[in-house]
Image: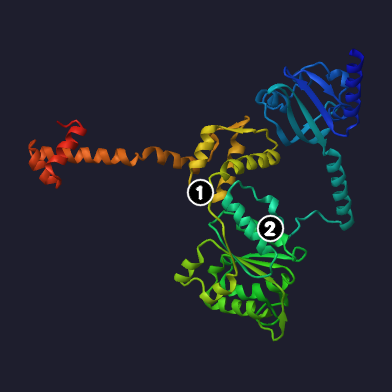
Amino acid sequence: MFLKSYETKQMLEAILGTIDEAIHAVDSDGITIFYNKVAAAHDGLEIGHVLGKHVLEVFPSLNSHTSTLLKVIETGQPIYQQAQTYKNNKGQLIDTVNTTLPIKIGGRTIGAVEIAKDLSRVKQLAQKLLELQEKVVNQTAKPTTTSGAKYNWDDFITASNEMEQVKAYARRAANSSSPIMIYGETGTGKELLVQSIHNASARRKGPFIAQNCASLPESLLESILFGTKKGSFTGAVDRAGLFELAHGGTLFLDEIHAMPLDFQTKLLRVLEDGVIRRVGGTESYVVDVRVIVAMNEHPQLCIEKQQLRSDLYYRLNVFFIEIPPLRKRLGDIPILTYHFIKKYNYLFNKLVIDIDDDVLSYLESHSWPGNVRELEHAIEYAMNMCDGDTIVMAHLPHVVTRALGEKITIQPLKLAVEQTERNLIQQALRIANGNVLKAATILKIPRQTLQYKMKKYGEQ
């Protein structure tokens, strides 16, 4: 029996040794019980120098807060896809993405195992490629521009039934080429939804062009959307507009109600016949563009305020999608919070794995006028401020916690009403020299009511 167990152990070690990812396992005391060749190569160490020793003894640059293995043993919670950059024992810079899991038996954590994928070689090859490209073009690298859609349905982080319904309706809209009108407050994720629709549509291989109409001055609006013909005005050149650039794809116009009403008439005509003419030109171009528009005010309100033409509204409002604000889907706050913590752990090379219960409760009670965007920025700030592994109230930005102070200073309505009532009764009794009937007359309430309230507040 002993021999069979020993052979099984050897077989398991041989299997784990063939895996091309680093594996490091420790027991509940932090003592290494398994360490494969890939992990040793990462760290520039010998397997024998690590086995049987405590993690902090072998890696003195770590501590109980920065070691993912020790943190998982302490909390019993897994840590997924944690980016890590460090210098190994030979001075080499190593980039890995680690997943650390607790080892449990009967609900008790008896150790932890970390699986690390080495990205160093990939980064080195990428850097060499960039250097070769730079030599070929003989110029320094410049930022690249993009007009494509990067989001898809997997980027929807939600536990809300309302948002799942929005997603289901948007999927149906993606199968059509009809116009879409989206309404949602600032920061609710309108462009994420629009890009997901584009990437799920038959036009996903075509261009995706987005333009915020509020950012365009009226004088440039027509030339930006429809293009210009050389010589049409001073400095004008032959240039395609956004409709031409979006041919075969999707044109997303945000805050369409910011367009002047007279220009909305021109846009309506293009939507009706699919023909555009560049500013100053005589030739017409037929364009095949799917138009999606978004608004941060309800379209009916914009029509009443004469910011949106009703005929344009009826033309665009084939599919109408309303994104609920964050305050109406409070169940999304915890899942979004942990999503942003994971995101900024990767970007900031941090190891934050938890958030204080009081902080999470407060986040769920905050009104979030800036919606998901405001929540993300709050978590980003907190991640910058947090030096440990848990976000606490002190890490939140002042603009968010200030609302907490305002909430604390406001009395509950019942207490405020009772205090006001007590003060008025005391004033009326002083004026009436203690005469209950006169005081009741001053307060314009029945004598019996006053006597009841005096007894209630201990004024008798």
Tell me the quadrant of the picture where the N terminus can be found.
Answer: top right
Task: Return the residue nearer the eye: 365 or 85.
Answer: 365
Residue 85 percent across, percent down from the top left: 76, 34
Res. 427 visible in picture: no
User: Seen in the image, is 34 located left or right of residue 269?
Assistant: right
Q: Measured along the vertical axis of the image, is residue 314 above or below residue 123?
A: below
Q: Gap between marks 1 and 2, in whole Å?
A: 23 Å
**Residue 181: quarter of image:** bottom right
Query: From this viewpoint, which residue is outermost toward the bottom?
Result: 282
Q: Residues within 10 Å of mark 1 (few under 14, many from 20)?
A: some
Circle 1 — which element? helix
Q: Residue at x 53, y 68 (%)?
A: 257
The amino acid on which the numbered mark 2 sits, given as a three-letter code, is Ser
Residue 327's disc number: 1
Q: Residue at x 63, y 30 (%)?
A: 389
Q: Residue at x 72, y 36 (%)?
A: 80
Residue 196's disc number: 2
Mark sitting earlier along the chain (1/2): 2
The amino acid on which the numbered mark 1 sits, given as a three-letter code, is Arg
Tell me the quadrant of the picture where the C terminus can be found.
Answer: top left
Residue 90's disc number: none
**Residue 270: quarter of image:** bottom right
Residue 69 percent across, percent down from the top left: 73, 26
**Residue 70: quarter of image:** top right
Q: Residue at x 88, y 20 (%)?
A: 9
Q: Residues within 10 Å of mark 2 (few under 14, many from 20)?
A: many
The color scheme shown is: rainbow
